[in-house]
Image (cartoon, rainbow, N blue to C red):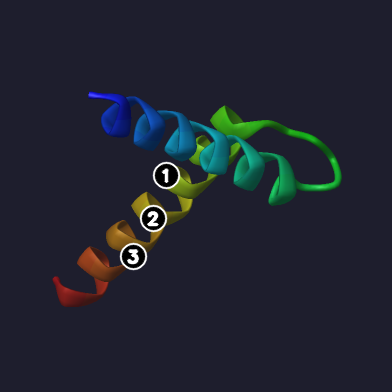
Amino acid sequence: MSKLITLCLAVVLIFGISIYIFQPAGGTGLKQQVRNGHTTVTNQVRSFDYVTN
C-alpha cells in the first residue's frame, strides 16, 4: 500500500514540475494551452477533410 501511495505522490510531483518547467513565458496556463492545441488539431483535421473531399 505504501508503494502505491509513494508512486502516486511521485507522479503528481513529476507532473507538477514538468508543468512548471514547460510553462510558456507569457504564463497562459495549462487550460489555455490545451484549448490552443485542440484548436490546432481540429483545424488540421478539417483542412485534411476538405482536401480528401
The kind of residue on which mark 2 rests is: Val
The structure residue drawn at horizontal position 30% and vertical position 34%, both measured from the top left corner, is 3
The kind of residue on which mark 3 rests is: Ser
The structure residue drawn at horizontal position 69% and vertical position 51%, both measured from the top left corner, is 22
Q: Position of residue 34 (x, y in %)?
A: 50, 39
The structure residue drawn at horizontal position 37% and vertical position 63%, both measured from the top left corner, is 44
Whole-angstrom CA distance, mark 3 to mark 2, is 10 Å
Whole-angstrom CA distance, mark 1 to mark 2, is 5 Å
Q: Earlier in the sequence, mark 3 or mark 1?
A: 1
Quarter containing the C terminus: bottom left
Find numbered disc 2 in the image and state the secondary structure of the residue it sits on. helix
Q: Where is residue 24 in the image (x, y as percent from the top left)?
A: 76, 47
Q: Do the numbered discs 1 and 2 sit on residues whose CB atoms are within 8 Å? A: yes
Q: Where is residue 7 in the image (x, y as percent from the top left)?
A: 36, 37
Question: Which residue is tagged 1?
Answer: 38
Q: Which of marks 3 and 2 is nearer the N terminus?
A: 2
The kind of residue on which mark 1 rests is: His
Q: From the viewer's perspective, is residue 1 above or below residue 53?
A: above
Q: Judge the density around disc 2: few (<14), some (14-19), many (≥20) Cα neighbours within 10 Å.
A: few
- In this view of the protein, which residue sits in the foreground, 29 or 48? 29
